[in-house]
Amino acid sequence: MLSYNQVTNSEINNNGVSVKEIAPIMKLNLRGKTREFFTNVGKSLNMILPTEANTSSSSDKLTAIWLSPDEWMIVSNETTSKETNIYQLNDILFNNISKTSLGAVTDVTDQFVQLEIKGEKIYELFSSGCPFNFNLFREKKGSTTQTLLNHIDVIIHNKDENIVNLFVRRSFAKHLWEWMEDSSSRL
């Protein structure tokens, strides 16, 4: 059984930026590149994986984030129970992809912390600790990037205007949280 520990039980609200942890959310890593892989994943997820770099695709229940030409992160759009770490979708994909040697399915739910960041000054916060140019990114809903934020690897997904989801490895999440709290207070 899952013993889920949130990074923090608080929320950051500074100078037009709010940050909160969204938990627990199922996160799966998919790898594959054959036509059969795409067909089986499409049928299992009821959606098409994005094939263009730094994009995403969504359905009512899931979001697929492009990570590389043969790698995606599948994220649930809904929270799940804190009492379990068993996901039906993981079993379905494992049976249709991994067991048939079409690709790999890895549950990364506990590896990544998902932060939802809202506000008009999100990109000012990011620019204070990130080398990535967010000019085009901020205008295109669904765009994604893997970059460094305060020297920490992160995945950023543009969910909507002034709303992003940020994924960070659990071991760096507390440090990044403290940096965002400090940096947002200086905007």
Image: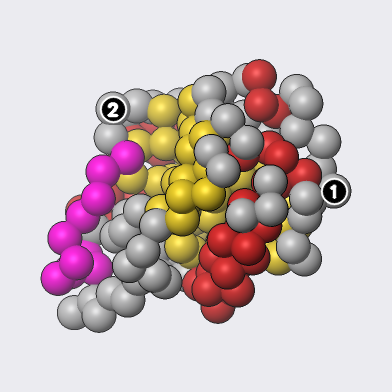
Quadrant hosting residue 151? bottom right
Q: Which residue is mark 2?
A: 60
- Mark 2 or mark 1, which is nearer the start of the sequence? 2
Mark 1 vs mark 2: give the one in front. 1
Residue 99 seen: no
Disc 2 marks which amino acid? Answer: Asp
Residue 66 pos. (x, y %):
60, 39
Instruction: Locate the N terminus by quadrant.
Output: bottom left
Q: Predominant secondary structure in magenta?
A: loop
Identified at 60% across, 73% down, the residue is 175
Identified at 77% across, 44% down, the residue is 127
> What's the magenta region?
77-86
**Residue closest to the far top:** 139
Quadrant hosting residue 60? top left
Residue 77 pos. (x, y %):
32, 40
Q: Is residue 79 magenta?
A: yes
